[in-house]
Amino acid sequence: MAPEAKSTSKSSLSPLPMLLVSVGSMAFWTLVIIGATRDDGFIVNVALGLGAVIAVFAITMAVRRSRARRALRERILDQGTLAQARIVSCRNNGAMNNDPYVDFVLEVIPEGGERYEVGYRTLVSQMAIPRVQPDTIVDVWVDPTDPQQVVIDPKFTT
């Protein structure tokens, strides 16, 4: 399976879903406390129902976000322009199944264009870590519509 990729450049994510989950969570705990202190099972049941709705909403939003990132990654790999980039820095940012999520700062070197820096996060196989160290030159695919969106060629990260 291909690793998830996420550009760390500024994005236009709406704060509304997070706001809804936050307010819903506060309402959940308020109802739980009120129901518990009044020994009112109905209020506790309403709180549990609200908690279930919040959980389903949060999971749905996470799945949508993941699918959108994967679709963007696949589109860039299919339609993007191949360029080279120098890894300026890399930093571990968590892990999944013992493979690290790495935040890269890349200096993209487009053919015939000005160099520029972008941030990029991806899952890197433990076996690929030696291939993605600072000052290493890697191939990247650049989004033709937004040069700040890049994907490191999977041969370097898998």
Image (cartoon, rainbow, N blue to C red):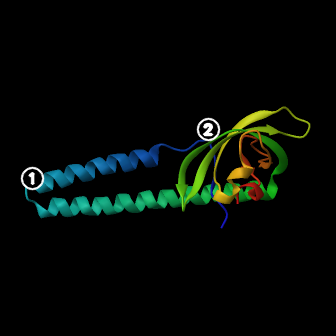
Going 68% across and 59% down the picture, which residue do you hit?
A: 127
User: Which of disc 1 and disc 2 is earlier in sequence?
Assistant: 2
Q: Is 129 positioned to the left or the right of 97 in the image? A: right
Residue 125 is at least partly visible in this image: no
> Can you say whether 32 is above or below 103 in the image?
below
Identify the disc placed on residue 10. Answer: 2
Residue 54 numbered tag: none
Q: Amino acid at mark 2?
A: Lys
Between 54 and 112, the one lying in front of the other is 112
Residue at far left of view: 38
Q: Secondary structure at mark 2?
A: loop
The residue positioned 90% from the left and 40% from the top of the image is 111
Q: Nearer the viewer, residue 14 or 2?
A: 2
x then y, percent, for residue 36: 12, 56
At label 2, counting other C-alpha atoms closer than 10 Å, the crowd grade (few under 14, some 14-19, many 20 or more) is: few
Q: Quadrant of residue 98?
A: bottom right
